[in-house]
Structures are given as structure tokens and as C-alpha cells.
Image (spheres, helix red, strand yellow):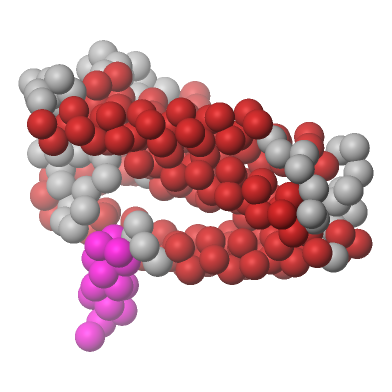
Amino acid sequence: MALQEELEKQGVWLFRYRSYLPLVVLLIGTILYLRTEIYPDTFFLEETPYEIFYEMGCLLVSLLGLFIRIYTVGHTPKNTSGRNVKNQLADYLNTTGSYSVVRHPLYVGNFLMWLGPALITGNLWFIVAFCFFYWIYYERIMFAEEQFLRKKFGETYLNWAKNVPAFIPKFRSFVKPNLPFSWKKVLKKEKNGVFALFLIYCTFDILGEVIENEHEYNYFIIFACIATGVAYFILKYLKKHTSFLNEENR
């Protein structure tokens, strides 16, 4: 099999399981985070007054990634951007909004969302390894996705891709989105990611305090985790049993 076909095949497989394979990285990160809590001398900010600011900075990195995803999904039509489970979907070629500055804004958002938990481990080598893993992992997914779009949209896709970078945004080329922002689509598509994000940080915070035999919990994170968890189950019910979150062509 030629390299081009092999990369596309790998990308299709990784796309299908992209929600599960990173959990291995999360597990390793959790172990390293607990190691840092047990051996605070391995991270220079551990047990200092600046530790809480560093942790909140990590959260802000993840929230930036979440914001990018929310903005992108909120301005796109049906069957384009979102959490497609198995197959690539593209009834339209998105070229405005986030897609006017970068070809894969959702993966930029994903990177920042996962970078936050990687940073919070305080392990430099793990952070570097995470960035390398993400590069290799999503490079193949992006390759497969672009092959799909190229076959479907032909010259239209090539002309757009020629002027829009794959991963590093070029903000001066921003074009206003064609569609208005849809909170209903965001609530329907991104509820999983919002809850998962705060659940990860909440778990890290509680495990860290348990390991240190302390009770200085970050109640903001705990409250946010509970609130987004309740919202997740409410939205899941509304999506399954009502049409409240439905919008035409969104």
C-alpha cells in the first residue's frame, strides 16, 4: 500500500476512535500528576503560593480551547463540524468564521483543551511527549479528512486550502460567518466536552488533596463540575426525548 493510502487508512481509523484513544494519555497524565503531588520537589511550583495560579492558568488554556470549539460549532450548518461518531460528514464546505483563519479549528480547540491537563502534571517531558503525540495522532486524522474533502469538493476545496493554514491560525484572513450563532447546536453538540473538561480538573483536584491528606479543595472547580454534570444529563434528556434543541439545518 502506498504511503498516501496508508496515512489515509490510519487517519480514518484514528478518526473513528479519536474520543477513546486519548484516554490512555489522560491515564498516564493522572499518574504523573499524582507523582508530583507525592514528590513535590519534582515541580518547582508545587506547595508554593503560586501553585493555585498555575492551576487556574492551565484551566484557562483548556477553556480557550473550549471557546474555539463552541464558536466554531455554533456558526456551522448541519452535518459539518461537531462530534461525528464514525464517519466523515460534509454536506457543505465551511470557509467562513473559524474556517477562514485555519482549516482545522476544532482540532486546534481539542489541542488546547487537552494541553491544560497535560500542563497541570508539572512534568516537562510528559508535556513535550503529549505535544508530539498530538501532532502524530491528529496529523493523520487531518490528512484523512482533507482527502475526503478534496474528493468531494474538488477545486473549491483546493482553492480554499491554498490560502488557509492547516493548524496555525492566520487571523488577518478572517471572514464573518455566514450563519448566526446557534446556542442550541452548541448545547446539543458540546455538552460532552464541557462536562468532561471540568470532571477532569475536579478529579485532579480531589485526588491531589487526598494524596496530600489535606482539604483545601478548589470549590470553584467542584461546583463547575457538578453544574456542568447536571446540565449534561438535562441536555441529554432534552435531546433524546424532545425537539427543544432542534433547529432547521443546524
Report the front residue among 196 and 111. 196
Residue visible at 61% across and 63% down? 29
Q: Quadrant of residue 118?
A: bottom right
- Of residue 81 and residue 190, the one placed in the foreground of this image is 190
In the drawing, does residue 30 fall left or right of residue 13?
right
As displayed, is residue 84 above or below residue 135? above
| Residue in front for this viewpoint, 158 or 232 | 232
Nearer the observer, 51 or 116: 51
Give the image quarter of residue 38.
bottom right
Using the rendered image of the protein, determine whether residue 156 is visible from the camera's viewpoint: no
In this view, 125 is above or below 200: below
Q: Position of residue 191 (x, y in %)?
A: 34, 35
In the picture, the quarter occupied by the N terminus is bottom left
Q: Is residue 118 left or right of residue 86?
A: right
Q: Say which residue appears at 45% left-offset and 63% top-offset.
A: 23
Q: Position of residue 2 (x, y in %)?
A: 25, 82
Q: Residue 113, image x and y in percent?
A: 52, 44
> Can residue 91 be seen?
yes
Q: Residue at x 10, y 31 (%)?
A: 241
Furthest residue in direction top, as rendered: 180
Q: How many marks?
A: 0
> What residue appears at the point 36 percent right and 29 percent down from the top-left corner?
231
Q: Is residue 202 magenta?
A: no
Left or right: where 85 falls relative to 240: right
> What secondary structure is the magenta-colored segment mainly?
helix
For the record, the magenta segment spans 1-17
Q: Position of residue 220 (x, y in %)?
A: 63, 29
Q: Is residue 4 magenta?
A: yes
Residue 180's place in the image compared with 56, above or below, is above
Residue sitting at the far bottom: 1
